[in-house]
Structure formats: structure tokens, C-alpha cells
Image (tube, rainbow, N blue to C red):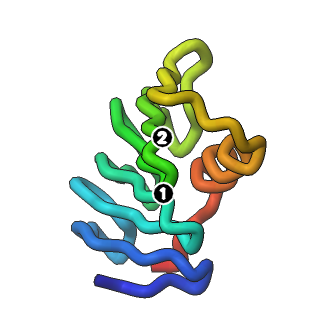
Amino acid sequence: MKYLFTGSKYIGEYVDGRMEGKAKYILPTETIYVGEMKDGVFHGERTLYFPSGTQYDAVWENGLVWLNSPIWTHLEKSPRAITIVETASITPSRG
């Protein structure tokens, strides 16, 4: 497990010093991303798990969620959850 300057934790593969491949990315809020990383950002059909039990399934392309792809399981009531998704999708790694 590697601790990042953002306070996040990363368990996964690296290619040329960048997060790349299968990964588990744990944000400081204990929200967990499980999926693929590409060039240091979320990529592919993957999931965010919130501590509340909410699940956010989406297609990520180069760190951003594709429009119309997200599916919420037990819709998160907190606007903070949306901010976490947006922040997680654009936070770069310094690997």
C-alpha cells in the first residue's frame, strides 16, 4: 500500500512510475475505488464504494465519468458524495 500526498491510499500496479492497471484507491473519506487505472487516473467500467453502503458504478474515461453512465445503488443523499466522485476523478497522482 502506498500513501499519497492527497491522504489517499493506493494498492495496485505501476507502469513507468504511474498508477496503471488493476487497483484499489482509498480516499481520505474511506470511499473506495475498485477498478482500473490508466496513466494515473480512474479508467474503465468500475465502482466507487461509499462508507454508507452506497455504490456508484460508472464508466470512467481518462479520469472522468462518461455522461449517462453512472448507476447509483442506494442513492447517496449527501451532496458531498457527488463532490467526492468529481474530486476523485480529477485528482492527479504524483506516484
x 45%, y 60%: residue: 40
Is 51 placed above or below 72 here?
below
Quadrant in the picture for residue 66: top right
User: Residue 81: x, y in percent?
Assistant: 66, 46
x 24%, y 55%: residue: 21
User: Residue 6: x, y in percent?
Assistant: 61, 78
Is 73 placed above or below 28 here?
above
Is 67 placed above or below 82 here?
above
Is 81 placed above or below 20 here?
above
Q: What element carries label 1?
A: loop
Q: Is mark 2 on a helix, strand or loop?
A: loop
User: Residue 94: x, y in percent?
Assistant: 53, 78
Pick out the residue farthest to the right.
79
Quadrant in the picture for residue 86: top right
x 43%, y 46%: residue: 53
Picture disc at residue 54: 2
Quadrant of the image for the C terminus? bottom left
Q: In this view, does 78 lie to the left or right of 31?
A: right
Which residue is label 1 attached to? 51
Amino acid type shown at disc 2:
Thr
Q: In this view, does 73 lie to the left or right of 75?
A: left
> Dot 2, how many residues are within 10 Å of its Cα: few (below 14), some (14-19), or many (20+)?
some
User: Residue 25: x, y in percent?
Assistant: 39, 64
Q: How many marks?
A: 2
x 28%, y 59%: residue: 23
Amino acid type shown at disc 1:
Pro
Q: Do the residues labelled 2 and 1 touch (CB within 8 Å)?
A: no
Q: Distance between the residues labelled 2 and 1?
A: 7 Å
